[in-house]
Image (cartoon, grey):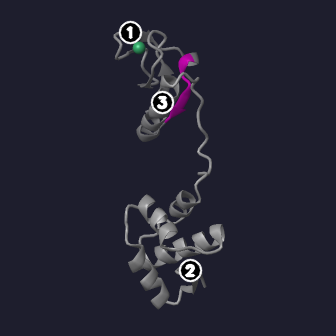
Amino acid sequence: MKYGLVICPSCGRARGVETSRKTTSCSCGRRVKLRRSMIKFETDSPKELAEMVGQANEQLSSGKKFRRRKAKESEDPFVRVARACMTLKDPVQRGEAIARGLTDELGEFGLDELRRVLAVLGSNDPEDLVRRLTEANMVYEVGGGRYRAV
Ligand SMILES: [Zn+2]
């Protein structure tokens, strides 16, 4: 199944459709005849479609034109580090990857930086992580509560 994003010609809101369909009914009540040319974005992932529709409506409601944002790297180094180790399930491996990522990005890090990465990953115990990493000799303290990956 393919999904597409269309913008309702009546209310200007984005919505997701199955591209095999001929028409769709918008929440504004307008029945929209679907044409190929109306599909702004196509995917086979309903999840990606939902994200894209959300993104489009956010842009449209603030008066901008819909522009597909590229899945480019986040501007935020903490988000970048978190993303890079999201798939690591083992807490020690993950901790090591975080420490290494922060060291690469910032040179050294403290509990605050660690906390910001952990927040993206949905956990919040930087003290515990630092203790474990220090014990495992994966990081060392450079002084003043700042750490670096070994
Ligand atoms: Zn509409």
The percent coordinates of residue 80 (x first, y second) are 57, 59
The alpha-carbon separation of the residues under discs 1 and 3 comes to 22 Å
Q: Nearer the viewer, residue 111 or 8?
A: 111
User: Would you name the residue on which mark 1 appears?
Assistant: 31
Could you tell me the amino acid type at mark 3? Glu
Residue 3 in sight here: no
Q: Secondary structure at mark 3?
A: helix
Disc 1 within 8 angstroms of ligand 1 (CB): no
Q: Secondary structure at mark 2?
A: strand
Q: Which residues are magenta?
A: 38-43
The image's mark for residue 113 is none
- Given this view, does label 3 or label 2 mark the residue nearer the observer? 2
N-terminal of the two: label 2 or label 1?
Answer: 1
State which quarter of the image contains the C terminus.
bottom right
Q: Secondary structure at mark 1?
A: strand
User: Would you name the residue on which mark 2 appears?
Assistant: 147
Which quadrant of the frame does ligand 1 lie within?
top left
The percent coordinates of residue 142 (x first, y second) are 60, 85
**Which residue is located at x 57 percent, y 73 percent?**
109
The percent coordinates of residue 16 (x first, y second) are 43, 27
State which quarter of the image contains the N terminus.
top left
Against 56, is 35 above or below?
above
Task: Classify residue 15 as left or right of residue 40.
Answer: left
User: Would you name the residue on which mark 3 appears?
Assistant: 58
Quadrant assignment, res 90: bottom left
**Looking at the image, do the residues carrying marks 3 and 2 touch, with CB atoms under 8 Å apart?**
no
